[in-house]
Amino acid sequence: MPRYFGALTLVLLLGMVIARVFILKSRGIQAMHFGRQDKKDFLIPPFAFFYFYLVFADAFGFPLPSRWEFFHSTAAAWTGVVFCLAGLSLLLGSLVSFGRSFRVGIDTDHPDRLVTSGVFALSRNPIYVAFWLVLAGQFLVFPNWLLLAYFFAALWLIHRQVLLEERFLGDRYGREYSEYRRRVRRYL
């Protein structure tokens, strides 16, 4: 059962983000800016699709490049489900807190207001924390060495993106962002 929930988590995560992008688009807001700052971002989707395949293949018994797992533990798998639920909840809270300011990528042309309330009063990057919770949870559900490699690659890629966003936010919002940085941690 945890394996099915692990696969469902990806559907829900992606569905929430895509739904938010389309809702904003219907209100005249272009929220999709992925790859506009850094053209190398377009290398990410093939790896993401392979990750999705790994999770769904493991959940539904399709062929995998490797079935070697670190451990077999029902308790760890259910703990992973809890991590996934926490990540999805945090993502939903982030999307609600973001409101009209949500963007995928950096919007240099039409940035909205700086969001510092809701879950953003606890973390400057709750969406990325949500992604990490989901990835950690999925590793506990599917303890394959490939998912562990993805987890560490995601740590690096997300941190890289956060540094780019912080530079932009500092330039765009100046003192307001500096004060926010002093009050609220980057991640947790």
Image (cartoon, rainbow, N blue to C red):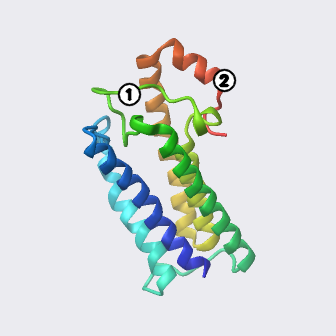
Residue 53 can be seen in this image: yes
Q: Position of residue 139 (x, y in %)?
A: 60, 67
In this view, the residue farthest toward the right is 75
In this view, the residue farthest toward the top is 175
Quadrant occupied by the N terminus: bottom right
Q: Amino acid at mark 1?
A: Asp
Determine the secondary structure under disc 1. loop
Q: Amino acid at mark 2?
A: Arg
Residue 73 can be seen in this image: no
The residue mark sitting in front, 2 or 1, is 1
Category of crowding for the residue at label 2, using alpha-carbon neighbours closer than 10 angstroms: few (below 14), some (14–19), many (at least 20)? some
CA gap between label 2 and label 1 equals 21 Å
**Which residue is found at the position 41% from the left and 59% from the top?**
14
Category of crowding for the residue at label 1, using alpha-carbon neighbours closer than 10 angstroms: few (below 14), some (14–19), many (at least 20)? some
Horizontally, is 181 left or right of 95 in the view?
Answer: right
Residue in the foreground of this view, choosing between 32 and 144: 32
Query: In this figure, which residue is indicated by the disc labeled 2?
Result: 183
Horizontally, is 124 left or right of 82 in the view?
Answer: left
Q: Position of residue 7 (x, y in %)?
A: 49, 73
Horizontally, is 71 left or right of 31 in the view?
Answer: right
Residue in the foreground of this view, choosing between 103 and 98: 98
Tell me if residue 52 comes above or below residue 122 in the rendering.
below
User: Residue 47's quadrant in the figure?
Assistant: bottom left
Quadrant occupied by the C terminus: top right
Q: Which mark is residue 112?
A: 1
